[in-house]
Amino acid sequence: MTKYGKMQPVVMRVLTVMLVTSFIMAVVVMATPVQTALAGGTSCTGWTWRGCCDSWWPGLQDYYSRECYNLNNHWTEWGCRVISGC
């Protein structure tokens, strides 16, 4: 066994912890609603899960919506997502 043989399990453990931590952070960031600014002074809230919807895709899908507005208008954008827990 070389002098570096004992370090391999420690390095693997550290890399595993870093990978799991990165994955959890990515999930938290994607799940957090954020206000987004679009071109032309338009702002929208983050996408929010609203329930289930039916579309041309077989079966039910998750239904998301968000509120958008600019100086003169206010509207709601919505959509069904293929990946579903419905």
Image (tube, rainbow, N blue to C red):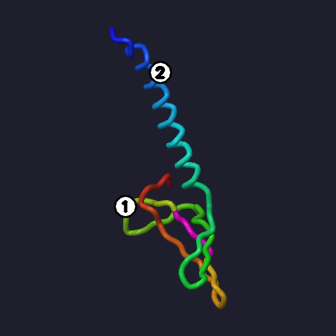
Few, some or many C-alpha atoms within 10 Å of disc 1 (few <14, some 14-19, many ≥20)? few
Left or right: 2 in relation to 51:
left
Q: Residue at x 48, y 25 (%)?
A: 13
- 57 or 10, which lies in front? 10
Q: Residue at x 46, y 55 (%)?
A: 84
- The label on residue 10 is 2
Tell me residue 29's x, y (percent). 57, 53
Q: Is residue 19 above or below residue 3?
A: below
In this view, which residue lies farthest toward the left?
A: 1
- 68 or 49, which lies in front? 68
In this view, which residue lies farthest toward the bottom?
A: 72
Give the distance between the C-alpha atoms of the residues marked 2 and 1, in whole angstroms. 47 Å
Report the magenta residues as a range: 63-67
Tell me residue 7's x, y (percent). 43, 18
- The residue under label 2 is which amino acid type? Val
- The label on residue 58 is 1
Along the polypeptide, which appears first: circle 2 or circle 1? 2
Circle 2/circle 1 CB separation < 8 Å: no
Tag 1, which secondary structure?
Answer: loop
Tag 2, which secondary structure?
Answer: helix
